[in-house]
Image (cartoon, grey):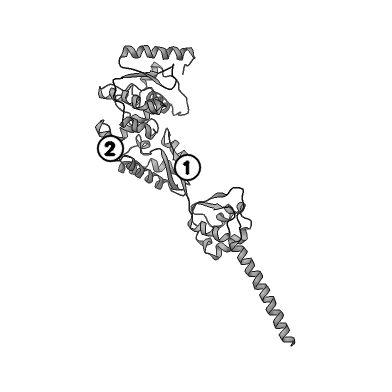
Amino acid sequence: MYIKKILFVVSILIAIGLAIFSYYIYNSIFSANTDFKESTHAVYIPTGAGFSTVSDSLKPYLKDLESFQIVAQKKGYATNVRPGRYLIRKGMNNNELVNALRSGNQPVSVVFNNQERLENLAGRIAEQIEADSLSLLKAFQDEEFLKNASFDRESALGMYVPNKYELYWNTSAEEFRDRMQKEYNRFWNQERLQKAEKIGLKPSEVIALASIVQKETAKVEERPRVAGVYMNRINRGMKLDADPTVIYSIKRQQQDFDTVIKRVLYKDLEIDSPYNTYKYAGVPPGPIFMPDISSIDAVLNYEKHDFIYFVADVENFGYHKFAKTHAQHIRNKQQYVNWVNKNGIRR
């Protein structure tokens, strides 16, 4: 009788222990363990990171780090960490959290436009994916890649079509560059290639001219007309005589791309640079900055007209006055010069 009581008590204690253990296991696996103000939070796990890095990254957002670590060990995640961007939700349990970290690498939206140089582009992309600016710039300037892709260092910026792209955060510099080459080839579809051929320009020349057009006018609706002026000059064998190329030449010569130049002086027109379209005929060897798609299409679909000249319209800021004759242009230009002098713009 005494032994039966002991066995009964032991069995009760075991049952209680199992219940407690089961409750602990259930809580460890299925109770909410993420806690932060937002409804979701992005966690970034670098390439080559181990489980300790993951734990450190998650610690500020977990109620109980130890229970997460136990579940991660049991599910085999601790020895199979995957880099990337992972979106975790408020109120996730450890089971959901580990599952998300094992298979939920989320893409990021990478956006860029209007970059002046490859260096600027590399810095902009490095803000949005894991690859740093130095590795990106190295990939952008790789001589073998450029040769195989029919680019050089002068025209390379034109390969990057400004837009919004979905990429994984842990995309490498080379993977990003290769993806952009595919996007470039996709952008230059048969229709655009035919239009470029029809106006007598290569795609790289279209992009270089588009960069000038966009620097000339911020008004999207005016870009086809400005492009028409430059195409008229090209078709008549005239130099482009584009002020933005002179400004770019100055910055390039001085290696100072932060300087703001509001006025081009006569002496500037003599600067010896292949980008100076007052000195050298034809389209520059590369874009003077990254043009928008609207500017590229403005060149491909330029407005047909007889205008040869244009100058800023001081009566309608942001727009320009166009002229068919040099005499008419001189009159328009004098209005602009008078306004510049009146406002004390010397440089």
For badge 1, the amino acid type reads Ala
Res. 346 mark: none
Q: Is residue 36 left or right of residue 184?
A: right
Whether 150 is drawn above or below 282: the answer is: below
Res. 126 mark: 1
Q: Residue at x 42, y 15 (%)?
A: 336
- Label 2: state its secondary structure: helix
Q: Residue at x 61, y 63 (%)?
A: 28
Find residue 312 and report its horizontal and vertical position in percent: 41, 19
Find residue 159 and report its horizontal and vertical position in percent: 36, 39
Find residue 57 and report its horizontal and vertical position in percent: 57, 52
Disc 1 crowd rating (10 Å Cα; few below 14, some 14-19, many 20+) is some
Mark sitting earlier along the chain (1/2): 1
Disc 2 crowd rating (10 Å Cα; few below 14, some 14-19, many 20+) is some
Q: Quadrant of residue 207?
A: top left
Q: Is residue 271 left or right of residue 195?
A: right
Asked whether the viewer can see residue 286, the reply is no
Q: How many marks?
A: 2
For badge 2, the amino acid type reads Leu
Residue under numbered circle 2: 193
Of all residues, the one furthest to the bottom in this rendering is 1
Of all residues, the one furthest to the right in this rendering is 2
Whether 142 is drawn above or below 29: the answer is: above
Q: Residue at x 37, y 35 (%)?
A: 293
- Label 1: state its secondary structure: helix
Q: Quadrant of residue 322?
A: top left
Whether 9 is drawn above or below 117: the answer is: below
- In space, the residues marked 1 and 2 are separated at their CA atoms by 31 Å
